[in-house]
């Protein structure tokens, strides 16, 4: 860190699966950039379970409570069983109500000019974890029940956030994605609220609404009609992976979990167990999340330098294997060599 650089305490969770590899690559770029972050490394997820700890240890929570800022690798949650998702618990613990997931073309592929932002409600809906079995006949697990809960206050908060984000970034339109034809109350609430809040932005930011199944098709057929999308928790989770597919895959899309008191920055993707430990994961998504974290603390010049270096690297054809099939002449690099190439392009 050069003299005069700000020093900003931040929590680091390297994560599970490919987490340590992509975090290592991201930290190498941040170090070369002279980033202001002073890391307090903590653990979580499967790594913590393997150490005999709770998947969300108190020390990790205390660290984020203190720093209000975290860079986080993906954390695994075993499917089924009794563990609640660590990611969901983290969002709840820090009131991280808005999950901001941009998808922007860096390497032209199937689409050339995608520049979308999805704002996903991050705390409610079908992710509240209220599920149980009910007996049907002799079968004690004959019926599976999940409760979905959306509050008007939360709908207002996240939809207003989406409009404010659109205004701040000079975006033209917000699209509310829902399923109010079937989930008339659970997601109909969002339709009511977007009309109320959209009216406040009349003449500045347009808004429209779309049913989620149609939105999935329209995103593939005519993505240019969208700008900022705001939606409920489950739909946002699914559509943001779809949007990642539009720009080249999960290796390229960052996410920010934002609340009034804290921000946790991560990739959209998970732990990618199928390629973990092979030094071939794409660290770009986490690098872009780190650039967003730099913006979050006001280090815009460093954020821009980092993004430009990533773009130069990818556009020169130096890429990890997941992007090998996109157009252009490609040199396939390992995770660590890709980080070196980005560092060389920092300028
Ligand atoms: P995943 O996102 O881990 O992987 C989906 C596919 O994309 C895999 O084929 C994987 O190899 C590929 N992929 C993902 N990231 C990549 C990268 N950076 N470079 C190259 N290829 C990449 O989804 P999954 O397999 O459904 O989930 C695995 C685990 O991750 C689960 O335990 C899940 O709960 C967890 N998860 C965590 C988060 C998070 O921490 N925010 C998000 C999603 C899933």
Image: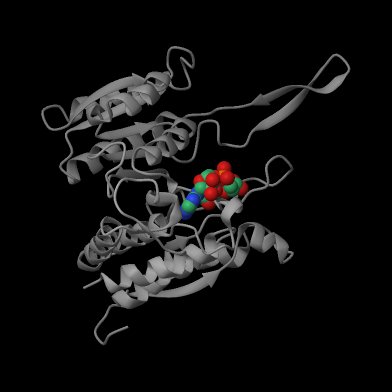
The tally of labels here is 0
- In which quadrant of the rendered image does the C terminus lie? bottom left
Quadrant position of residue 320:
bottom left
Image coloring type: one colour
- Left or right placement of residue 79 versus residue 271 in this view: right
Judging depth in this view, the residue of 237 and 343 nearest the camera is 343
Instruction: Name the residue rendered at 23%, 27% in the picture.
Output: 225
Q: Position of residue 131 (x, y in %)?
A: 67, 31
| 87 to 243, vertically: above or below | below
Instruction: Name the residue rendered at 23%, 30% in the picture.
Output: 224
Instruction: Name the residue rendered at 18%, 38% in the picture.
Output: 171
Q: Position of residue 99 (x, y in %)?
A: 40, 44
Judging depth in this view, the residue of 313 and 102 nearest the camera is 313
Q: Residue furthest left?
A: 203
Judging depth in this view, the residue of 329 and 111 nearest the camera is 329
State whether residue 195 appears in this view. Answer: no
- Left or right placement of residue 113 versus residue 121 in this view: left
| 81 to 305, vertically: above or below | above
- Left or right placement of residue 48 versus residue 108 in this view: right
- In which quadrant of the rendered image does the N terminus lie? bottom left
State whether residue 33 appears in this view. Answer: yes
Q: Position of residue 285 (x, y in %)?
A: 40, 54
Q: Residue furthest right?
A: 138
Q: Residue furthest bottom?
A: 3
Instruction: Name the residue rendered at 30%, 21% in the picture.
Output: 209
Judging depth in this view, the residue of 6 and 216 nearest the camera is 216
Q: Position of residue 173 (x, y in %)?
A: 20, 31
């Amino acid at each position: 860190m050069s003299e005069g650089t700000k020093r900003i305490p931040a929590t680091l969770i390297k994560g599970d699966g490919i987490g340590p590899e992509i975090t290592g690559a991201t930290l190498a770029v941040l170090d070369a950039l002279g980033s202001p972050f002073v890391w307090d490394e903590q653990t979580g997820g499967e790594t913590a379970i393997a150490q005999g700890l709770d998947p969300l240890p108190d020390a990790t929570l205390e660290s984020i409570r203190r720093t209000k800022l975290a860079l986080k690798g993906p954390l695994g949650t075993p499917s089924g069983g009794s563990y609640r998702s660590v990611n969901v618990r983290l969002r709840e613990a820090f009131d991280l109500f808005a999950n901001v997931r941009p998808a922007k073309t860096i390497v032209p592929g199937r689409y050339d000019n995608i520049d979308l932002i999805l704002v996903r409600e991050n705390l409610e809906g079908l992710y509240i974890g209220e599920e149980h079995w009910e007996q049907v006949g002799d079968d004690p697990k004959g019926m599976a029940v999940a409760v979905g809960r959306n509050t008007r206050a939360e709908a207002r908060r996240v939809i207003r956030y989406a409009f404010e984000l659109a205004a701040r970034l000079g975006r033209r339109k917000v699209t509310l994605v829902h399923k109010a034809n079937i989930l008339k109350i659970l997601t109909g609430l969002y339709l009511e609220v977007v009309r109320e809040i959209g009216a406040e932005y009349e003449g500045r930011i347009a808004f429209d609404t779309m049913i989620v199944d149609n939105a999935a098709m329209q995103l593939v057929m005519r993505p240019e009609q969208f700008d900022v999308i705001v939606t409920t928790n489950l739909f946002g989770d699914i559509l943001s992976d779809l949007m990642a597919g539009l720009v080249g895959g999960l290796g390229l899309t960052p996410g920010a979990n934002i609340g009034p008191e804290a921000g946790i920055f991560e990739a959209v993707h998970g732990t990618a167990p199928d390629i973990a430990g092979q030094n071939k994961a794409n660290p770009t998504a986490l690098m872009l999340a780190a650039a967003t974290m730099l913006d979050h603390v006001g280090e815009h010049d460093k954020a821009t330098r980092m993004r430009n270096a990533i773009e130069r690297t990818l556009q020169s054809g130096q890429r990890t294997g997941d992007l090998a099939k996109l157009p252009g002449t490609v040199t396939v690099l390992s995770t660590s060599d890709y980080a070196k190439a980005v560092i060389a392009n920092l300028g």
